[in-house]
Image (cartoon, rainbow, N blue to C red):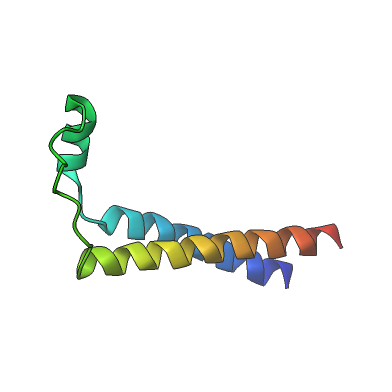
Amino acid sequence: MYNLVMTLLIIDSIAIVIAVMMQPTKQQDALNALSGGGGELFGQQKKRGFEAFMEKVTAVLGFLFFLFALILVYLGSK
C-alpha cells in the first residue's frame, strides 16, 4: 500500500509540473508588478476556456498531492 501511494504521489507531482507549464502566460501581470500596477484598473476579467480549465486542474492536482502526502505520512508511521 505504501508503494502504491508513493507511486501515485510521484505521478501527481509530475502532472502538477505539466499543468503549471501548460497554463497561459500573464505578461501583463508581470509588467504591472514592475510598473506599479496602475494598468489594471478595469482589467479584472473572469477566466474562461482553457485558462479556467487549467486553473481547476492545477487546484485538483494540488489537493490530491497533499492528500497523498498525508496518507503517506500516516502509512509511514505504522
Which residue extends farthest front? 41
Query: Whole-percent x and y of residue 72?
Result: 71, 61
Residue 33 is drawn in which quadrant? top left
Task: State the image coordinates of residue 64 (x, y, percent, origin top left).
Answer: 54, 66
| Above or below, 24 relative to 41 | below
* Residue 15 is at least partly visible in this image: no
Q: Is residue 10 visible?
A: yes
63 to the left or right of 22: right
Residue sitting at 78 percent across and 64 percent down? Answer: 75
Percent position of residue 61, x then y: 46, 65
Q: Residue at x 68, y 67 (%)?
A: 3
Image quadrant holding the N terminus, namely: bottom right
Q: Residue furthest right?
A: 78
Q: Which residue does the image show at 24% across and 63% down from the upper left?
A: 51
Q: How many marks?
A: 0
Q: Give the residue at x 53% y 63%.
A: 63
Which sits in the foreground, 27 or 14? Answer: 27
Q: Is residue 24 left or right of residue 55?
A: left
Point out residue 28 in the picture as x, y percentages from the top left corner: 15, 41
42 or 72: nearer the eye?
42
Q: Is 63 placed left or right of 74 in the picture?
A: left
The quadrant in which the C terminus is found is bottom right
> Splitting the image into 4 quarters, where does residue 71 fall?
bottom right
- Residue toward you, 31 or 60: 31
